Image: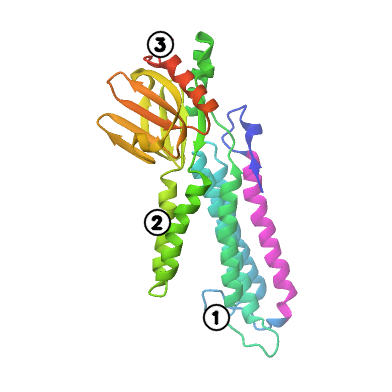
Amino acid sequence: MTFDGSHDSTDDRPVDARALRFALIFPVLLAAALFLGGFLIRAQLPDGVMLPTGGEPIPVPWFLGLGAAVILVLGAGVGSQGARTSLPPLRRRILLGLGMTLQLAAFTFFVAALLGQGAPGGLPETPVDGFVLLMGCGLAMAMGVVLAMTFKPAEQWSATDDKVLAQLLDAEADPTASNDMMAYFVHPRGSVTIMILLAAILPGAMLSVVSPWILLGAVVLALLVISTLTATVQVDRHQLSVKLLGLLPVLVVPCEGVDAAVSLDISAKDYGGWGLRKHSGSATFLTHSGAAVVLRQNNGGKVVVSAPDLDIADDLSAILNRRAGKSPDKH
């Protein structure tokens, strides 16, 4: 269920037509399904049916009409806001997912009331069928999250596009600029990962007889340790950056502060060990012994960053040497 509004990105339409169609049509179909199901079991509700919130029974057609109205208001009313191209993409995703969750939850409430009060002979009648309500609301939440994750808002010109355009213009002025960017993923070797997990799981399993929370805590601690050795390394014309799990920046080195860079095959213990280490103006981020890039800074400091292999380390050092001592506006 992927919705791509990129075909509307060539003009300035205030509404993503494809997202709007979905936001309007889906609740209509859902309301129609409620009517169909209600009429199929109306014979089991000769005295009418109570609303999910309680009260006196009302005729089945009135009940179904009210249910359809609630579904349409929540689904189309909230979901259609996600089609507004003037809103940020993240907010549009949330609104469309929220509309899906609310309309499915409303549908579940009314269906659970029908099934609970229209139970076949021999089964106790209840205002709302709890099993239907529980499963339906769980599905509503799941569908809302899935829709929010898969919906692709219509693309609009943004600050990111401005940045890309600036990079293209720079590349025309400096033919080597387009090559001065690189990114890769570093992580501990498989044997190290297994060793960390075993060091946590084995003692935790033995101590779980005291409390199962000890084992859980040990596993969480091991995963945290592994996450501190997992990062993305990225370089462009501005800087070299290291981000834990690709999200948290822990090391940033401006290119204008770099004097020279070299790729080496190193031993982690010679540079203080694994992980992030900072001391006296120098910094290292090493996930294993082996390929790495060693930078000498203008202020006398040193930065060492791991690389998957020597070929990648060579490429990274070449970019850094081209950009060494240069600010982003100089070519």
Mark 1 highlights which residue? 56
Q: Residues within 10 Å of mark 3 (few under 14, many from 20)?
A: few
In what quadrant of the picture does the C terminus appear?
Answer: top left
The residue that appears at 59% across and 80% down in the rendered structure is: 57
> Farthest residue toward the left?
280
Looking at the picture, how far across and down is residue 171, in whole percent?
A: 52, 14
* Amino acid type of the residue that numbered disc 3 sits on in the rendered structure: Lys
Closer to the camera, 330 or 307?
A: 307
The residues bearing labels 1 and 2 have C-alpha atoms spaced at a distance of: 56 Å
Query: Which callout, 1 or 2, points at the residue further toward the start of the chain?
Result: 1
Q: As shown in the figure, which amino acid type bears the numbered disc 1?
A: Glu
User: 262 or 252: nearer the eye?
Assistant: 262
Q: Amino acid at mark 2?
A: Leu
- Residue count near mark 2 (Cα–Cα under 10 Å), binned few <14, some 14–19, many ≥20: some
3 vs 2, front mark: 2
Q: Position of residue 76 (x, y in %)?
A: 59, 52
Q: Main secondary structure of the magenta part?
A: helix
Q: Residue at x 53, y 31 (%)?
A: 309
Q: Which residues are magenta?
A: 17-43
Indicate whether 53 appears above or below 257: below
The reply to whether callout 1 and callout 2 are in contact (CB within 8 Å) is no
Q: Earlier in the sequence, mark 3 or mark 2?
A: 2
Question: Seen in the image, is 17 located left or right of residue 186?
Answer: right
Nearer the observer: mark 1 or 3; the answer is 3
> Can residue 300 be seen in the rendering of this structure?
yes
Question: Of helix, strand and loop, which one carries label 1?
Answer: loop
Residue at numbered disc 2: 221
Residue wearing tag 3: 330
Q: Position of residue 109 (x, y in %)?
A: 58, 70
Residue 70 can be seen in this image: no
Secondary structure of the residue carrying numbered label 3: loop
Q: CA distance from mark 1 to mark 3?
A: 78 Å
